[in-house]
Image (tube, helix red, strand yellow):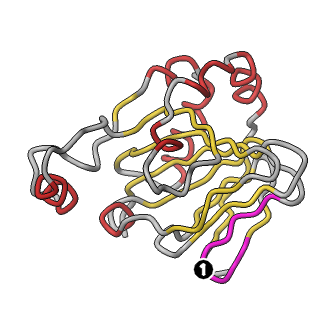
Amino acid sequence: MNNFHILTTADVNQLMLNIKRHPELWKEDTFLRDYPQGPFGEIESIMLRFPEKRVFEQEEELEKYKRGESQFDQHESIDYPAFAVLTEARSIVFGLMALVQGERLGRVMINKIAPGGQIFPHADSPEHTDYYTRFHVVLQSAPGCYLRAGDEQLEMKTGDVFWFNNKLEHEVVNNSAFDRISMVVDIKVKK
């Protein structure tokens, strides 16, 4: 496989138990789900780290931001309140940073796709994919859950920690009877 690489497995039990003890976290941030014409309309997310949400009055301001010509750093992510609640995520995230010799931690979010749901086909922006490398930590999965990147697909298993090429068109489909829950971790690594 060229578009995926399994790195290791993680013990995700304690984190999953804490997520189940705090179901209210799924409703705190609907940014991805509500993003106009976005591919995430069928998911729920828990934001652990994410850029500050900004509203740009003019299209020119947004384009400057994307090109890195703004006073705001588009690659800067901040801790969201859920990161202080789901403390078990920290050892997984920072263990992954050490494993890949990461230089900067970006977005960290937990996405849930209900049975029959999906993240629709899309490719992440070049500004983001040229800067950060995308990793996944599968927190809960079952046969029938897969991630497609380009012309390859990976059936995700609970505990899998893997890289995938998010520069390519990709999608996630949950054809199982269980919620598929995965933690997305963006890390800047030496290229």
Q: Residue at x 78, y 31 (%)?
A: 13
Left or right position of 102 against 19 = left
Residue 23 at x, y percent in the picture: 69, 21
Q: Is residue 104 magenta?
A: no
Residue 148 counted in the magenta span: yes
Which SS does the magenta portion mostly show?
Answer: strand
Residue visible at 74% across and 52% down in the picture = 117
Dot 1: few (<14), some (14–19), or many (≥20) neighbours within 10 Å?
A: some
Q: Amino acid at mark 1?
A: Gly
Q: Which residues are magenta?
A: 145-153
Residue closest to the eye, 141 or 137: 141
The C terminus: image quadrant: bottom left
Q: Is residue 130 left or right of residue 187?
A: left
**Position in image of residue 61 (x %, y %):** 12, 52
Quadrant position of the N terminus in the picture? bottom right
Dividing the picture into quadrants, the one containing residue 105 is: top left
Q: Judge whether 141 appears above or below 30 on screen.
A: below
* 159 w.r.t. 90: above or below: below
Taking the image as shown, residue 95 lies to the left or right of residue 131, namely right
Q: Which residue is mark 1?
A: 150
Q: Is residue 140 above or below residue 38?
A: above
Image point (43%, 44%), residue name = 107
Q: Nearer the viewer, residue 62 or 145?
A: 62
Which SS class for mark 1? Answer: loop
In the rendered view, tell whether residue 162 sits above or below residue 103. Answer: below
**Residue in view at x 54 percent, y 74 percent:** 169
Rendering coords of residue 182 (x, y %):
67, 46
Comparing 76 with 121, the one in front is 121
The spot of residue 133 in percent (x, y) is 45, 61
Q: Nearer the viewer, residue 64 or 86?
A: 64
**Number of callouts:** 1
